[in-house]
């Protein structure tokens, strides 16, 4: 059981603290730029949280060259540039643990220091750096101010060669290993999981391993379980694991038990790979998903226990889990069909189609080749 402090009127704390830098992502194939997009795990997670109506505080750093308008202002480091990643989709090889692409960090913003974190307490904390911006002392501060901390292993084990190519090191050599007993969850892809001893780490914290189209597995000290996937037409795998983590934590914030929350994570991972860059979720789909989550929560409220005003999260797969999986799959299918109908009904207006399929958020999610968003984007420097 993992114990967190629930939010009450006497304890009006923010639900989640997200820590990780925003990035500029450049996607390349065949030597040509396919897309330029807002990147960084923080952007994908906050995108999912906004869709699920989860309140959060985000600590992120960018440079003056940051070019995407957001609802959530990052910390601007005036002497640094925004972190930039280039993803080469035709150069994938096994050593960097991304078989489908090679990642290169071509710019790196300042790290996030403990002093950058808010002086508040949170139910959940998420350490989701992508470019080496989270320091051991920053993670240590997070476990002090958050009741349950979730860590994406890429924040711990990524290192960078002189040319910026991303490499991975063993978790024991990362400089973070001593903090694992104070972490509640660690998430890794199946490739990243090779860089830790899952059997050893699960003795200290819950380990969640994602397997793409095969769903995910959850390991804890006393057991393990597989969580089923959702069908997806993969176009771009970027951010799928981040969206999974956003859906997973978002489900826990809404009161789901761990297996059901992992299903929600799989759903958002499958939605993300079907788009290039930061996804835009259909508003009707989001509302249907929230309705399903609320029904599920009300149906199994009895599975939660309160001890000393603390909320215990259950790892037991509850009755009706498969039915919840089926209802989410049906919701996704219905929304997908609705989008396809809109595409058939509105063939003459690309801008109208874009507005129907992708509800307008204030953030600028992505720039595609031949994008309907043809206005130039200002940088932070331009807006000062």
Image: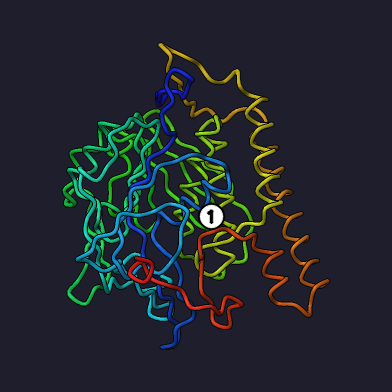
Height in image: 104 above or below 315?
A: below
In which quadrant of the rendered view does residue 320 lie?
A: top right
On the rendered structure, is 79 left or right of 84? left
Graded by Cα atoms within 10 Å as few (under 14), some (14 to 19) or many (20 or more), the crowding at tag 1 reads many
Assign a secondary structure to mark 1: helix
Quadrant occupied by the N terminus: top left
Note whether residue 154 is visible. no
Q: How is the image coloured?
A: rainbow
**Percent from the top left, x then y, of residue 111?**
22, 56
Q: In percent of the image, x 41 and y 29: which residue is there?
A: 13
Left or right of residue 61: residue 70: right
Q: Is residue 12 left or right of residue 168?
A: right
Give the farthest residue toward the right. Answer: 345
Residue at x 16%, y 51% (from the top left corner): 173
| Above or below 370: residue 378 | above
Vertical side of 11 occupied by 347: above or below: below
Q: Residue at x 46, y 58 (%)?
A: 70
**What percent of the width, then of the height, locates residue 284?**
71, 51
Residue 283: x and y in percent read: 67, 53
Identify the residue position indicated by label 1 in the image.
Answer: 269
């Amino acid at each position: 059981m993992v114990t967190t402090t629930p939010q009450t009127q006497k304890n009006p704390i923010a639900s989640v603290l997200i820590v990780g830098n925003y990035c500029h992502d450049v996607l390349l194939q065949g030597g040509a730029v396919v897309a330029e997009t807002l990147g960084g795990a923080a952007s994908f997670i906050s995108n999912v949280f906004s869709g699920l109506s989860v309140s959060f505080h985000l600590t992120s750093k960018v440079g003056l060259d940051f070019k995407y308008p957001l609802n959530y202002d990052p910390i601007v480091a005036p002497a640094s540039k925004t972190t930039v990643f280039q993803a080469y989709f035709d150069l994938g090889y096994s050593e960097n643990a991304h078989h489908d692409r090679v990642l290169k960090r071509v710019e790196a913003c300042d790290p996030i220091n403990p002093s950058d974190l808010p002086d508040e307490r949170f139910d959940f904390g998420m350490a989701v750096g992508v470019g080496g911006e989270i320091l051991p002392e920053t993670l240590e501060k997070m476990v002090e101010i958050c009741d349950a901390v979730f860590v994406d292993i890429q924040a711990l084990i990524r290192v960078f060669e002189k040319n910026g190519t991303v490499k991975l090191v063993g978790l024991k050599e990362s400089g973070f290993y001593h903090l694992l007993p104070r972490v509640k969850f660690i998430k890794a892809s199946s490739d990243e999981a090779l860089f830790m001893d899952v059997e050893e780490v699960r003795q200290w914290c819950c380990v969640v391993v994602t397997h793409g189209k095969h769903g995910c597995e959850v390991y804890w000290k006393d057991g393990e379980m597989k969580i089923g996937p959702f069908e997806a037409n993969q176009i771009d795998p970027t951010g799928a694991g981040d969206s999974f983590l956003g859906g997973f934590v978002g489900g826990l914030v809404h009161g789901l038990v761990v297996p059901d929350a992992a299903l929600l994570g799989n759903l958002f991972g499958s939605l993300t790979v079907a788009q290039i860059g930061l996804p835009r979720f259909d508003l009707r789909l989001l509302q249907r998903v929230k309705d399903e989550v609320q029904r599920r929560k009300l149906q199994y409220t009895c599975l939660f226990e309160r001890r000393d005003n603390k909320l215990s999260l259950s790892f037991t797969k509850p009755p009706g889990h498969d039915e919840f999986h089926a209802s989410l799959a049906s919701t996704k299918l219905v929304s997908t069909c609705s989008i396809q109908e809109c595409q058939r009904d509105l063939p003459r207006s690309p801008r109208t189609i874009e507005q129907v399929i992708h509800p307008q958020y204030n953030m600028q999610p992505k720039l595609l080749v031949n994008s309907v968003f043809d206005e130039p984007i200002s940088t932070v420097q331009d807006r000062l």
